[in-house]
């Protein structure tokens, strides 16, 4: 199948931020509730959530919620200069772009930090469109963010694929009627596979081989 647009989640899909996000989540919770025990499922589930949703079950009120998010950002922002892309990130994006695909980002992250991450890796300019948590009222797993990026790119759902690392990415893509793919290095692989993505990619370069074998990469 051929596509007009390749859409990506950001954290844990294109950039190696899961450990930073998980550690920031734990630190923010422990600042207010040092004795709480967080399961591995809870720790990794934060990778597919907006911060409001991630912390709402732990904060006693809106003020504490804001303070937890502030603590999260304080730690995570201090670590973001260490962020690396997954192997062959620039090669894959350049190849897709040169081959005429429209490229989009659909992330639960804020625009400024997402932009900074991609600029630090010199790949920001490969993308035609960004949809962040600031752009929609509803968020993944709701399809609204995916539908918005399709509208911005003027691409029909049957001509796009959304690639992520969390079950919320697959749920959102499936509900938006685009094809979906999950990265095999995902911390939430088993959960994502339950949502029946169309593709499983062991690495970014395999996207080129599986989706468009005529790219000769």
Image: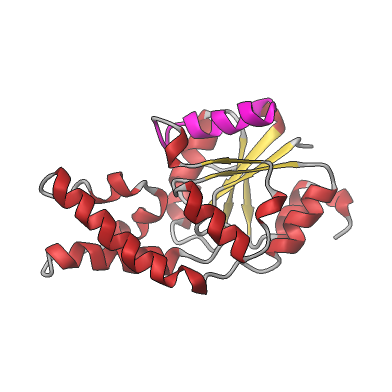
Give the percent coordinates (x, y) of residue 172.
49, 36
Residue pictured at 24% horizontal, 51% vertical: 55
Is residue 124 inside the magenta stretch? no
The answer to whether 159 is drawn above or below residue 114 in the figure is above
Q: Position of residue 137 (x, y in %)?
A: 39, 30
Image quadrant holding the C terminus, namely: bottom right
Q: Quadrant of residue 61?
A: top left
Give me the residue at 37% from left, 47% from top.
Answer: 49
The quarter of the rendered structure image containing the N terminus is: top right
Structure colour scheme? secondary structure
For residue 194, say whether it is visible.
Answer: no
Q: Is residue 207 left or right of residue 111?
A: right
| Residue lying furthest bottom | 82
Residue at the image position 78 percent from the left and 50 percent from the top: 96
Check residue 150 for magenta coloring: yes
In the image, the segment drawn in magenta is 138-157
């Amino acid at each position: 199948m051929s596509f007009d647009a390749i859409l990506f989640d950001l954290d844990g899909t294109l950039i190696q931020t899961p450990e930073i996000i998980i550690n920031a989540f734990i630190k923010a919770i422990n600042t207010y509730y040092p004795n709480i025990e967080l399961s591995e499922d809870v720790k990794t589930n934060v990778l597919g959530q907006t911060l409001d949703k991630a912390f709402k079950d732990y904060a006693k009120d809106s003020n504490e919620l804001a303070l937890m998010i502030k603590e999260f950002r304080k730690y995570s922002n201090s670590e973001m200069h260490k962020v690396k892309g997954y192997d062959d990130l620039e090669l894959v994006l350049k190849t897709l772009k040169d081959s005429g695909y429209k490229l989009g980002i659909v992330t639960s992250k804020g625009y400024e930090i997402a932009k900074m991450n991609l600029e630090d890796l010199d790949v920001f300019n490969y993308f035609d469109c960004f949809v962040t948590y600031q752009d929609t009222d509803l968020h993944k797993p709701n399809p609204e963010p995916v539908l918005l990026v399709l509208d911005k790119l003027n691409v029909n759902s049957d001509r796009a694929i959304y690639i992520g690392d969390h079950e919320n990415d697959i749920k959102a893509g499936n509900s938006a009627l685009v094809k979906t793919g999950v990265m095999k290095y995902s911390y939430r692989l088993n959960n994502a596979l339950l949502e029946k993505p169309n593709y499983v990619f062991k690495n970014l370069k395999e996207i080129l081989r599986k989706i468009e074998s005529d790219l000769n990469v």
